[in-house]
Image (tube, rainbow, N blue to C red):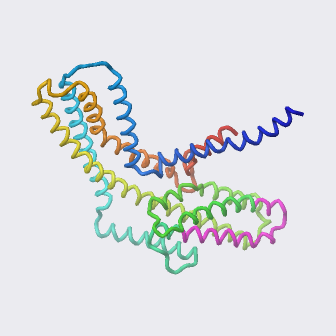
Amino acid sequence: MDEEREEEVTGPSVSSDRPEPREKLSQIHELVFLTGNRLLLAAVLLGSFLLVVLAIELRTSATSQQLVPLFYMSSAIVGGNFTLLTIVISINQLVISRQLAAPGELREQIENTTGYREASAELVEDRVLPPTPAMFLDVLLGGVQDSVRELDGYRSEVVSNAAADAIDEVLEPLDEQIGRAKLELEAEDTTTFEALVVSLNTNYSDDIYHIQRLKTTYEGEFTSDIDDCLDELVAGLKQIDVARQYLKTVYIQEELSRVSRNLMYIGVPVVLVALALMVLFVSTRQSALTPRLLSIVAPVFATVGATPLAVLFAYVLRLSVVSERTAAITPFTTPTQEATPFGAITEETEE
């Protein structure tokens, strides 16, 4: 009896404690790889690097006052940052080349975009759609949500209970998914990236697959109204996926411009500081800097020189995650696509 009581007491506590570490890991994973401030992430990386190197330096008993290693370090920092600045120029050329076009190409792009908006407006039965990405995506999600509720109203017309249960299995998770997305898009100051993050936490290819499987499996048991509603639901999900891919395109262009600008702001001062220190190391006598001062100057100087690299790493990390999660377009998907946080991955693999 005592053992059973211990199992009853400890059992629920262990199971209830398990999701908490997974949830925290998932939040940290998304913060580092996607949603966190890139400059803050770079600062954390540099701060950690500085603390580690300072600890190593302060624990060593070396008393060398040689400035030659610092001179070579300065040369390496100058050369490396010149390479990074060259990469920045290449990134700017890439972004600018994507935005340059002849009048005919521009007109064709505008017509294609207008045609997409008109098709979306017809689908959601709205004459005018908002121009901002977040509000536009919110309207599309609202149209799909209306189709879900309309289909739920036709549920009583289904002949068999198995077909009705199959409809519920498809509609319930989709309705919850869209409800969460719309709740996150309600803020008026939602940026393009925030709207993109909301659309990343979805799997519309799987939803479309399940809807099409539903129509095929229970063909003949649905009325024409239910079939039309399912077709509208698929069309709405496809429009949302097009909007998501366009949001990704806009975001990547904005992000590349932002990272190139930040690298210029940071890289040029770092190069100038490194050049100034090179002159200082060459003109300073060996006895001018004490060993203790050198043990502090060297790690700080190395950290400052690595700042552009840390900034580039932080931005490229998020760009790669966004590209990975939107690699395939509807009706295809990939195992790593559609944003599966760390906790969800852990749960799936354990099951």
**Res. 81 image quadrant:** top left
Q: Which residue is drawn at 58% across and 48% down?
A: 340
Q: Nearer the viewer, residue 251 or 326?
A: 251
Q: Residue at x 72, y 39 (%)?
A: 14
Q: Does the magenta stretch include residue 282?
A: no
**Res. 193 image quadrant:** bottom left
Residue 321, x across and y down, in percent: 47, 47
Residue 245, x across and y down, in percent: 48, 59
Q: Residue at x 65, y 56 (%)?
A: 209
Point out the image quarter for the C terminus.
top right
Q: Nearer the viewer, residue 248 or 260?
A: 260
Q: Does the magenta stretch include residue 145?
A: yes
Query: Which residue sits furthest bottom?
Result: 127
Residue 294, x across and y down, in percent: 24, 28
Helix, strand or loop: magenta stretch: helix
Q: Which stretch did the figure color magenta?
A: 138-166
Q: Nearer the viewer, residue 42 or 318?
A: 42
Compared with residue 284, is residue 63 higher up or lower down, i.e. above or below? Answer: above
Q: Residue at x 66, y 63 (%)?
A: 175
Point out the image quarter for the N terminus.
top right
Q: In this view, does 158 lie to the left or right of 348?
A: right
